[in-house]
Amino acid sequence: MMVSASIERELSAEAFPIRDGVFVAVVGPSGAGKDTVIGYARALFADESRLEFVRRVITRPSDASSEDHDTLADAAFAEAEADGAFAISWEAHGLRYGIPAEVDWSVANGHVAVANVSRAIIPALRDRYANLAIVEITAAPEILAERLALRGRESRGEVLARLARSANVALSGPGVTSIDNSGAREVAGERFADVLRRAMAFSDMSGLI
């Protein structure tokens, strides 16, 4: 269910960036297995109330080959965006993506929010959240190509174009952890779980200050 602009208005009285909790931004090229690694952690921390795995809103129907997300048509997405329903939103690959505004409340109240986002919005995330952890999920180029081909959503040319774009983007700045997901998901999943444990420990300490 979409929210109104009330959360944004309520938080606007507070100074940005939002503090106390941690926003964990998961980034990486298509085919790197971001949703797989996030899913591993979600199952591992199923009973952990301090963690929130964000359900994105996308202008794409949900199907078995993609993440479980909320879907809006382009016009409805634009209306929701104008109403302040998203903490942050972006466009990529002809689609629009939104992170629900409730995330701001969660971080402001000391929780750890985990979301799959675009590298392009990292500067905006740094401005919005005082405590930002960036996790870059990567994989060997041949594995990326194989995974993208198995999806069957793009032509070979489109797959190669995606790989070329991702190869030309480098992350920089503080708080970046790179995890190679070329092998068993448990290996990358446990490394990601360690990042989340540190984030929870940090938010616990932040709430005591």
Image (cartoon, rainbow, N blue to C red):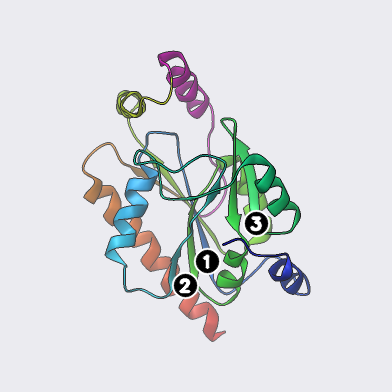
Task: Say which element carries label 1.
Answer: strand
Image quarter where the C terminus lies is bottom right
Toward the viewer: 173 or 145? 145
Task: Say which element carries label 3.
Answer: strand
Q: Which residues are magenta?
A: 155-175
The residue labelled by disc 3 is 86
The residue labelled by disc 1 is 22
Left or right of 38 in this view: 165: right
CB of mark 2 within 8 Å of CB of mark 1?
A: yes
Left or right of 138 in this view: 183: left
Q: Is residue 9 above or below residue 162?
A: below
The residue labelled by disc 2 is 202
Q: Is residue 21 above or below residue 68?
A: below
Q: Measure the alpha-carbon separation of dots 3 and 1.
A: 18 Å
Q: Which of label 2 and label 3 is nearer to you?
A: 3
- The answer to which quarter of the image holds residue 10 is bottom right
Q: Position of residue 185 (x, y in %)?
A: 25, 46
